[in-house]
C-alpha cells in the first residue's frame, strides 16, 4: 500500500487538476469569478499545507530525497503559489482573474507531480 | 504614475511569466551552484531564460498600461532565444550534457516556453490596435 504522503499527493494532483479545469471553464464562459472557485482554491491550499507538513517528514527523515534542494524548492513553492495568485487578483472578479487562478492551479498540479517524482 | 492595468488576457500572461521567472531562476541557481561542471552552457542559458522572463513580465505589464515599446522588442528577443537554443540543443548535442529550460523548444515544460512569446506577441498586436483605436476616438 502506498505511503500516506503518496496518497495525499495523489488527492492533491487530482483536486488541483479539477480546479484548473473549472477555472478554465469559467474563463471560457466569460463570466465573473464565482465565490465557489475561491473556496475551491483555498481548500486546495489547505491540502497543499497538509502535503507540505507531510513532506517535512520526508526531508528530515531517514531516507531524504537525492535531489534535496530541488525537492525543498518544490515543497516551498507548492504552498506559496496560490496565496500569491489570489493576492494578485484581490478585489478583481473580472473574467481574466479566473485565468490567473487557472495558471496557479496548473502550476500546483505540475509541482505536485514533480514532488512525487523527486521524493 | 501609470493607470492601473485593466482586466484582460495579459493577467494570465503575467502569471505565466512570473511562474517561469521563478521556475527557470530557481532551476538555474540550483544547477549552477551544485553541479556547475556537468553542463555549464545549459545552466547559464537557463539563467538567461529566467532573466528574459523577468524582463518579459515587466514588458507586458508596461504594455498593459499603454507603453508597448519594450514589449515589442522583448517578446521577439524571447522568441529568438527559444528558437535559437531549441535548435542548438538539437544540432549541438555536446553543448547540452544536461537540459536547459529552452532545450528542444521547452519540451521539459510542455512546450509552454515556445507558446508563451507567440501568445504574448498576439496579445501585443491586439493591445496596440486597442490603444490606436482609443487614441483616435479621443
Image: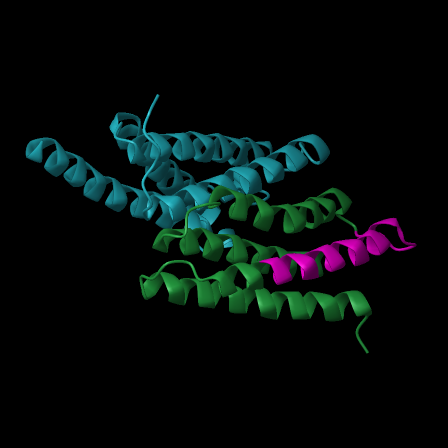
Chain colours: A green, B cyan
Q: Which image quadrant is residue B128 in? A: top left
Task: Provide residue B33's location: percent of width, then percent of height.
Answer: 69, 31
Residue A89 in the image: state x and y as whole percent: 46, 46
Name the residue nearer the viewer: B64 or B103: B64
Which residue occupies 80% across, 52% down? Answer: A65
Please provide the residue range marked out in magenta: A42-65
Q: Residue furthest right?
A: A62
Q: In the drawing, does residue B95 fall left or right of residue A93?
A: right
Relative to B39, B112 lies left or right: left
**Residue B99 located within the stretch drawn in magenta:** no
Location of the N terminus of chain B (image quadrant): top left
Q: Residue at x 33, y 25 (%)?
A: B2
Point 60% across, 70% down: residue: A14
Of B67 and B38, which appears nearest the observer? B67
Where is residue A18 shown, x and y percent of the image?
Answer: 53, 69
Regarding residue B101, the answer to whether it shows in the image is no
- Above/below status of B9 relative to B21: below
Is residue A2 visible in this depiction of the protein?
Answer: yes
* The quarter of the displayed image where residue B55 is located: top left
Amino acid at each position: 500500500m502506498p505511503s500516506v504522503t503518496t496518497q495525499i499527493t495523489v488527492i492533491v494532483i487530482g483536486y488541483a487538476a479539477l480546479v484548473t479545469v473549472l477555472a478554465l471553464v469559467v474563463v471560457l464562459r466569460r463570466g465573473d469569478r464565482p465565490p465557489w472557485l475561491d473556496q475551491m482554491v483555498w481548500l486546495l491550499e489547505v491540502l497543499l499545507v497538509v502535503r507540505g507538513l507531510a513532506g517535512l517528514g520526508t526531508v528530515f527523515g531517514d531516507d531524504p530525497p537525492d535531489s534535496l534542494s530541488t525537492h525543498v524548492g518544490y515543497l516551498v513553492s507548492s504552498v506559496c503559489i496560490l496565496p500569491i495568485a489570489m493576492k494578485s487578483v484581490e478585489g478583481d472578479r473580472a473574467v481574466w482573474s479566473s485565468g490567473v487562478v487557472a495558471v496557479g492551479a496548473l502550476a500546483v498540479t505540475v509541482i505536485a507531480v514533480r514532488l512525487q517524482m523527486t521524493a | 504614475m501609470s493607470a492601473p492595468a485593466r482586466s484582460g488576457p495579459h493577467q494570465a500572461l503575467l502569471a505565466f511569466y512570473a511562474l517561469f521567472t521563478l521556475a527557470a531562476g530557481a532551476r538555474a541557481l540550483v544547477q549552477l551552484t551544485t553541479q556547475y561542471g556537468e553542463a555549464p552552457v545549459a545552466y547559464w542559458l537557463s539563467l538567461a531564460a529566467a532573466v528574459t522572463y523577468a524582463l518579459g513580465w515587466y514588458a507586458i505589464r508596461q504594455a498593459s498600461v499603454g507603453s508597448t515599446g519594450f514589449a515589442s522588442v522583448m517578446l521577439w528577443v524571447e522568441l529568438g532565444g527559444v528558437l535559437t537554443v531549441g535548435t542548438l540543443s538539437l544540432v549541438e548535442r555536446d553543448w547540452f550534457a544536461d537540459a536547459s529550460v529552452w532545450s528542444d523548444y521547452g519540451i521539459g515544460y510542455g512546450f509552454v516556453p515556445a507558446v508563451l512569446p507567440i501568445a504574448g506577441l498576439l496579445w501585443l498586436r491586439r493591445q496596440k490596435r486597442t490603444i490606436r483605436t482609443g487614441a483616435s476616438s479621443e
